[in-house]
Image (cartoon, rainbow, N blue to C red):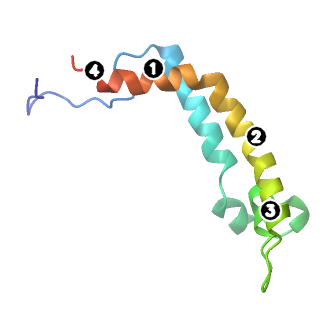
Amino acid sequence: MSRSYHRPQRPHLAERSTPANLSQRLCALTFIASWTDFFGPLIYLSNQQKYTLQLGLYNFFGQHMVDWPGFMAASLWVLAPVAILFFLTQKTFIEGITFTGIKA
């Protein structure tokens, strides 16, 4: 069934979801967005002692060489909290993906 021109459009995120599902998804996506932010801390922080993990990863790249083994090991440690968060909330994400594919 197609949507009518005069019918208000609703975002697919909110369709067939409970408030608990929405808040859980919002919290997870907000955490991931703030955890992976690179340019915000790069602009605001000038002291290397206060750099975030993502900026610390960037320090593995030198002008003429890259410490690839150290970079890959540190990348796994930075990825771990996001992977744990996904595994804890994957049921909610899969439900959201499934609901957007079902026609009403």
Residue at (33%, 26%) from the top-left corner?
Answer: 100
Look at the image and tell me whether residue 52 can be seen.
no
Q: Which kind of residue does numbered mark 2 sit on?
A: Ala
**How many neighbours does mark 3 have within 10 angstroms: few (below 14), some (14-19), or many (20 or more)?**
some
Which one is nearer the viewer's eye here, 28 or 45? 28
Residue 9 shown left or right of residue 28 in the figure: left
Q: Secondary structure at mark 1?
A: helix
Precedes in sequence: disc 4 or disc 3: 3
**In 3D space, how far apart are the residues under numbered discs 3 and 2 (Cα atoms)?**
14 Å
Precedes in sequence: disc 2 or disc 4: 2
Residue 86 shown left or right of residue 74 in the figure: left
Q: Report which residue position mark 2 lands on.
A: 80
Q: Report which residue position mark 3 lands on.
A: 71
The location of residue 65, given as percent across then percent down, is 80, 81
Q: Report which residue position mark 4 lands on.
A: 102
Q: Are marks 2 and 4 in contact (CB under 8 Å)?
A: no
Q: Report which residue position mark 1 lands on.
A: 95
Residue at (52%, 21%) from the top-left corner?
Answer: 92
Which one is nearer the viewer's eye here, 50 or 102? 102
**Residue 75 lies in quadrant:** bottom right
**In 3D space, how far apart are the residues under numbered discs 4 and 3 (Cα atoms)?**
42 Å
**In 3D space, how far apart are the residues under numbered discs 1 and 2 (Cα atoms)?**
23 Å
Q: Nearer the viewer, mark 3 or mark 1?
A: 3
Seen in the picture, residue 51 relative to 64 is either above or below; the reply is above
